[in-house]
Image (spheres, rainbow, N blue to C red):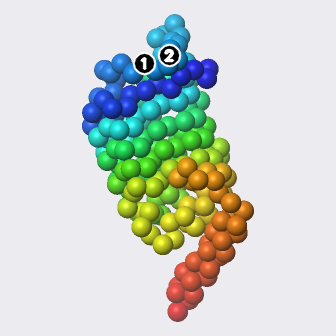
Amino acid sequence: MYGAPVDLSFKNISSLTDTWIEEPNSGLRPLKRNSEMKYLSCSLRLNNNNITDLHDLQKTVSHFLAQPAHLTWLDLSFNKIAHIDHVLCELRELRVLYLHGNSIFILSEVDRLGVLPHLHTITLHGNVIETNKAYRNRVISVLPRLKTMDFSAITRQERVLAKIWHQSSNRCRSSKVNQ
């Protein structure tokens, strides 16, 4: 089941439905298929395209993978994605998510990914949200199971600082509400 990634990168794809007529790129390891011609893989590369909307992501995963519920690694880097769509939260087995080099501009949308119980690696650098002073603290605090963010290991000290940041930001919000 842990075959080579299904690689649909660099295909100039604008819409996920466009992928359905594409053949994956061939890599060093050959892709294996089942009797239904679906790929025996738990990894999907959709990087370096022009994707703006993730609406059809579940259908796309189901189109290519023999066991879509077992998708563990998803690369959506270097596209034109502006929002962290709720559809990503349905990928319950996801462990690695690459979203770097997109156009994500609302930092609080990262909070949605907190429902993914196995997510341990994420990349978000190269998005507008990276310019927010609270960027790294916020992401670490809302995704407490992360081990790696933006290709950098999360240290114990960063976890402590993120926890302090989270507590102080909550106090600030609650004091504004009480005023």
Judging depth in this view, the residue of 78 and 178 nearest the camera is 78
* Above/below status of 138 relative to 64: below
* Above/below status of 29 relative to 167: above
| Rendered residue at 29%/40% (across/down) | 50
Judging depth in this view, the residue of 69 and 78 nearest the camera is 78
Drawn side of residue 18 relative to residue 24, left or right: left
Q: Mark 2 and mark 1 in contact (Cβ < 8 Å)? A: yes
Q: Amino acid at mark 1?
A: Ser
**Picture quarter containing residue 136?**
bottom right
| Rendered residue at 37%/44% (across/down) | 78
User: Residue pushed farthest bottom?
Assistant: 179
Q: Which mark is residue 130?
A: none
Which residue is denoted by mark 1 in the rendering?
Answer: 26
Judging depth in this view, the residue of 48 and 54 nearest the camera is 48
- In the rendered image, residue 33, in percent from the top left (x then y), is placed at 51, 12
Q: Reading the chain from its start, which is encountered first: label 1 or label 2?
A: 1
Drawn side of residue 17 relative to residue 89, left or right: left
Q: Which mark is residue 31?
A: 2
SS class of the residue under badge 2?
loop
Q: Quadrant of the N terminus?
A: top right
| Rendered residue at 35%/38% (across/down) | 48
- In the rendered image, residue 133, in percent from the top left (x then y), is placed at 48, 72
Give the Cα separation between the discs numbered 1 and 2: 8 Å
- In the rendered image, residue 91, in percent from the top left (x then y), is placed at 54, 39
Q: Amino acid at mark 2?
A: Leu
Drawn side of residue 58 relative to residue 68, left or right: left
| Rendered residue at 59%/47% (across/down) | 121
SS class of the residue under badge 1?
loop
- In the rendered image, residue 168, in percent from the top left (x then y), is placed at 62, 80
